[in-house]
Every structure is written in C-alpha cells, then in structure tokens.
Amino acid sequence: MSKNLNRREFCKKSLITSAAVTSACGLGEKTLLAAPVNSAAAPTRKDSATGLAMGKIGKVKISRLIIGGNQFSGWSHSRDLKYLRELFMAYSTDEKIMETLQMAEENGINTIITASSGYLNKYWKERGGQIQWIAQVHPKSNDLTSDIKRAIDNGAVGAYVQGGVGDSFVKNGRVDLLGKAVEFIKENGLIAGIGGHSVEVPIAVEKAQIDVDSSRELLVRYAERRQGRI
C-alpha cells in the first residue's frame, strides 16, 4: 500500500511540477516574443593598419593595393560560367559588402575603384568609413557630363572613363570626347583618367596630348609595344 501511495504522490507531484514548468516556459517565451528586437550592432572598427606602401596620383595619396567593386555588382568576367554572376550577387549582401570594405580599410587599403556609390554612402555613414572613391564613369557622346556629375556629387576623389567607353570613342575617331571628359573631371577638382581594353587607347590619348593623371589598363603592354617587344 505504501508503494502505491508513494507512486500516486509521485505522479501527482510530477503533474503539478510539469504544469508549473510549462506555464513558466510559456510565460518566458511570451516575454521574449514581446521584447523589442534589436538589430545586430555594427562590428567595432579596428584601427587601420599602417605600413602598406602608398603612392600619389595628382594630389591624392593612394595605397598601392586598392580594391575594386566588380565582385559587389556581379561582374565576374566568367565567360561561359554563367552561374557565377548569380553566385557573386547572392554572396554580396549589404552586410558582406560593409564587412569587406571595413576589412580592406583595417588592412591599409584606402581606395576603391567602382561605378556604384550607393553602398559607399551607406558604408561611410553607418560604419564611419573613410575609404576613397575613384569612380568609373560612362560618358556618352551626346551627354559627357551627367555621370561624371553623379560621381562628383557623391564624394569621389577621382574619376576615369570606363574601358569600354574609351575603346568605343577611339574606334569611332572621337578621341576629342575623351579630352573633353577629362577636362570636365579636372575642372571639378578630381584626378582624371581614361580606361581601355585596347592598346590603341593609350596610344591615341598620348597622341592627342590629353592631360590625364592616370591611363588605366594595358600600360605595360603599351610600353612593351613601344620598345618593340610585342
């Protein structure tokens, strides 16, 4: 009889305890659900690394290692690997872009070359970033200045004509438009450059005596060609 009573008492106490625990858990869950959800705080910035070699273009001091923005916008130059663009875009969330830019600065990289300014404005504002922006601009034959103005208004320290645009202007005999674009960039206090995928671009720029601060891409191949090596 004693065992039966003990068993009954045990079952009774167990049921009471279970009910109490369930009630407490339910109350705790409701409290957690009712509590305001705070978004994750931005990671604490570390002091930027020192010692990375620096150079100058015009008056702008630039780390000799810079970061580009193709990986943020999906330009993977992947030829027949068509899935890579989607992979790039899926990886480059807003948070990952902020994290990458901050990591670059913490390791001494002080400049980015990219066409987009949206994520840079966000980074400067939300993370206190100071990375400099050299803008890739796309002037058109019937509108040379609008895209350059966008870069100026959004804080670029420099701008260069995108390589495909440089190729097209040179191919169509409109090197004068490159000169006008560079002139407008420099008039507004930015360092100015011209990009190109064809070696004919720096040749044409030099021949036209366009006063660029930087002629991006293929300068090594151009130098080799002038020396008769290619």
Image: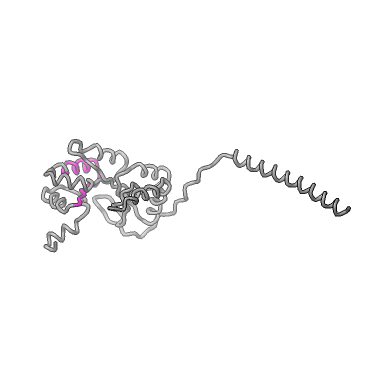
State left or right for residue 166 relative to residue 27.
left
Q: Residue at x 29, y 57 (%)?
A: 64
Quadrant into which the C terminus falls: bottom left
The residue positioned farthest toward the right in the image shown = 1
Looking at the rendering, the stretch of residues picked out in magenta corresponds to: 178-197
Figure label count: 0
Going by the image, does 69 lie left or right of 40?
A: left
**Percent from the top left, x then y, of residue 146?**
24, 37
Residue 147 visible, this angle: yes
Which is nearer the eye, 34 or 5?
5
Which is nearer the eye, 191 or 70? 70
Residue 193, can we see it? no
Q: Does residue 137 appear left or right of residue 204 in this picture?
A: right
Q: Is residue 191 magenta?
A: yes
**Residue sitting at 76 percent across and 46 percent down?**
15
Is residue 136 found left or right of 221 in the rendered image? right
Residue 78 horizontal/vertical position (percent)? 29, 53
What is the x, y in percent for residue 115?
29, 45
Magenta-drawn stretch contains 4: no
